[in-house]
Image (cartoon, grey):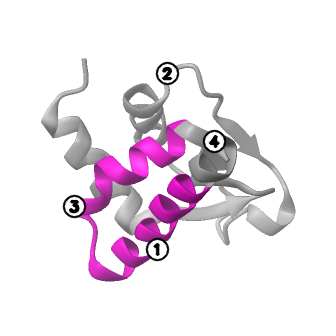
Amino acid sequence: MIEVKDIYYSAGLLEGEGCFRLSHGSPEISINMTDFEPIYNLKQIMSPLSTIRLHRNKSLVTINNKDVWHLAICGQLAIEWMMTLYPLMCPRRQEKLYMFGKIKLISKLIVYL
């Protein structure tokens, strides 16, 4: 069971380091960091079965040549988390997350028409 502190942890980490976007037409929450532990903790909270990837791509390697860890959560699970985190985000993020809520409603209408 997810605890309130875990939701706040997720919101704080994603507010500062996360990305909310459409990827190949599917809502996605992603994060890139050079520290493994915060991404691992986020994975355990949001989607324990997700995979954390290690990027050794030159474009994602930092100035200090640190490896970059990447976690992405997509589709329905991403939408559910976006709506859960919505009240904890800054107005700019809320505006972006609100758009994904509309996409969810629109897609349901299309399915049932």
Mark closest to the chain's N terminus, 3 or 4: 3
In the image, the segment drawn in magenta is: 77-106
Residue 93 on the magenta segment: yes
Instruction: Give how far apart the Cα atoms at labels 1 and 3 are.
Output: 13 Å
- Of the residues tagged 1 and 3, which is closer to the observer? 1
Instruction: Label 2, secondary structure: give it.
Output: loop
Q: Position of residue 100 (x, y in %)?
A: 51, 62
Mark closest to the chain's N terminus, 1 or 4: 1
Residue that badge 2 annotates: 48
Mark closest to the chain's N terminus, 3 or 2: 2
Mark closest to the chain's N terminus, 1 or 3: 3
Instruction: Give how far apart the Cα atoms at labels 3 and 2 are.
Output: 22 Å
Task: Return the mark for residue 112.
Answer: 4
Q: Inspect the image, locate mark 2, and give the three-letter code of the amino acid beneath it.
A: Pro
Which quarter of the figure is the N terminus placed in? top left
Residue that badge 1 annotates: 96
Depicted 40 relative to depicted 54: above or below: above
